Amino acid sequence: PRNWSRIKRFFVTFEICLLTFSVYIGSAIYTAGIQDVMQVFGVSQVAATLGLTLFVAGYGLGPMVWSPLSEIPQIGRNPVYIITLALFVVLQVPTALATNFGMLLAFRFITGFIGSPSLATGGASIGDMYSPAKITYGIAVWGVGAIC
């Protein structure tokens, strides 16, 4: 990856930033709907907040599976990124169509778990692309990309 053209490295860095942002926004955007979760499922505010808590717990635990898997040379990072991103997107449908509160919570945890590779291995991917003299810039862009 260090031998890639500058344009390709910038593009891949942008993709990693976008993946990271997507997972973080998937966590935060839930808070705008807590009132609706309370109304639709008839639960308290504390219970409704569990959707956020479980998503964050999922993306906290997911790296214990996905990071080691992405370091296996026969697998690599790309398949882990691509497969988990596809699952992350597909699993938004049953999350949105949840018919009961337990189903919503289960899918929030699963989507957090599945979405975590960009959070866990994004820095490692960026580290592979840039020289030691430039890695700090790549990591800084990735960090800012997560919050913009």
Image (cartoon, rainbow, N blue to C red):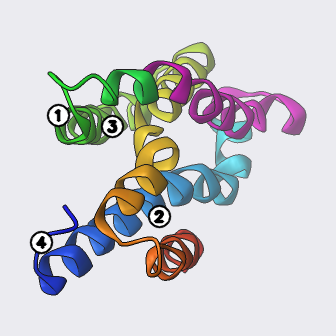
63 drawn magenta: yes
Q: Which label number is shown at residue 21?
A: 2
Q: Position of residue 93 (x, y in %)?
A: 30, 36
Q: Secondary structure at mark 4?
A: loop
Q: Amino acid at mark 1?
A: Pro
- Checking the image for residue 88, the label placed there is 3
Q: Earlier in the sequence, mark 3 or mark 1?
A: 1
Q: Which residues are magenta?
A: 41-65
In this view, the residue in front, 69 or 60, is 69
Q: Is residue 15 above or below residue 101?
A: below
Cα separation, mark 1 vs mark 2, equals 19 Å
Q: Position of residue 109 (x, y in %)?
A: 56, 25
> Which amino acid lies under the numbered mark 2 shown in the image of this protein?
Phe
Give the mark, 4 or 2, whose residue is nearer the N terminus: 4
Amino acid type at image mark 3? Phe
Q: Secondary structure at mark 3?
A: helix
Report the disc number at residue 4.
4
Q: Closer to us: mark 3 or mark 1?
A: 1
- Quadrant in which the N terminus is drawn: bottom left
Q: Earlier in the sequence, mark 4 or mark 1?
A: 4
